Amino acid sequence: MALLQIPLDKITEAHLNQLIATGASESRYIDYKQTTYGAADKDHAEFHADITSFANTAGGDIIIGMTESKGVPIKIVPFTGDADAEKLRLESMARTGIEPPMVGVGVASVAVAGGHVFVVRAPRSFLKPHRVTYGGRNRFWMRSSAQKFEPNVQELRKLFEGGAEFADRARQFR
């Protein structure tokens, strides 16, 4: 089970609890983080790697505020700070350090008992591939069944060709 079929602004604590109840493991479409991303350069780069891996593959959600064991969610661990400020910080991070810039990344702050859980949605991109350029980095990322990875040359070639194919199909449609 993934949350992609639910609009970001409609996700509730019940949906998050359902992920736990059904044992919805990390997959190509969902990733769990116990705590939010820090302020250090390496934390920003990790955030960028996570969202670009989803955008370069099939799109997906990062659930911030949920512990997991071997990829299976086990408990909600809510963020207890200023949820509005954290949401704005995550949205701001998504707008920098990625080339080409990603369009459509959304962040939802879901009220839960004791605080908030954040859902960061990175839609599948039609302008791929996106690379992380934050802090002088130059890396591409993709997502496999339960983790992100750096693509090899053949996989990168497919990413570049996929973006060109979309542009060609759009021109033909018009």
Image (cartoon, rainbow, N blue to C red):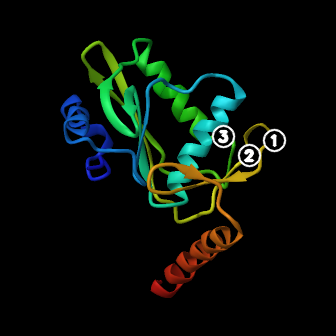
Q: From where the camera sits, is residue 108 visible?
A: no
In the image, taking residue 13 as reference, residue 124 lies left or right, namely: right
Kindly identify which residue carries mark 2.
133
Which residue, given by chain and number where applicable, does mark 1 sit on? 136
Residue 38 in the figure: left or right of residue 36: right
Instruction: Determine the secondary structure under disc 1.
Output: helix
Distance between the alpha carbons at the discs numbered 3 and 1: 12 Å
- Which residue shows up at 53% across the image and 76% down it? 166
Q: Point out the tag, 3 or 2, that comes first from the N-terminus.
A: 3
At a point 57% along the width and 77% down the height, the residue shown is: 167
Residue labelled with disc 3: 96
Residue nearest the viewer, comparing 149 with 140: 149
Q: Nearer the viewer, mark 3 or mark 2?
A: 2
Which residue extends farthest bottom? 172
Residue 39 pos. (x, y %): 64, 22
Give the residue type at disc 2.
Thr
The reply to whether callout 3 and callout 1 are in contact (CB within 8 Å) is no
Identify which residue is drawn at 66% across, 67% down: 156
Q: Position of residue 24 (x, y in %)?
A: 28, 44
The answer to the question of whether label 1 and label 2 lie on touching residues, with beta carbons closer than 8 A, is: yes
x%, y% of residue 126?
A: 52, 65
Q: Amino acid at mark 1?
A: Gly
Q: Is residue 157 visible?
A: yes
The vertical placement of 112 against 123, above or below, is: above
- In the rendered image, the vertical position of residue 86 relative to residue 122, given as above or below: above
Contact, mark 3 vs mark 2 (Cβ under 8 Å): no
Quadrant in the rendering for residue 93 = top right
From the viewer's perspective, is the residue at label 3 or at label 1 nearer? 1
Task: Identify the mark at residue 164; answer none if there is no mark.
Answer: none
Residue 151: quadrant of the picture? bottom right
Q: Residue at x 49, y 19 (%)?
A: 85
Comes first in the chain, label 3 or label 1: 3
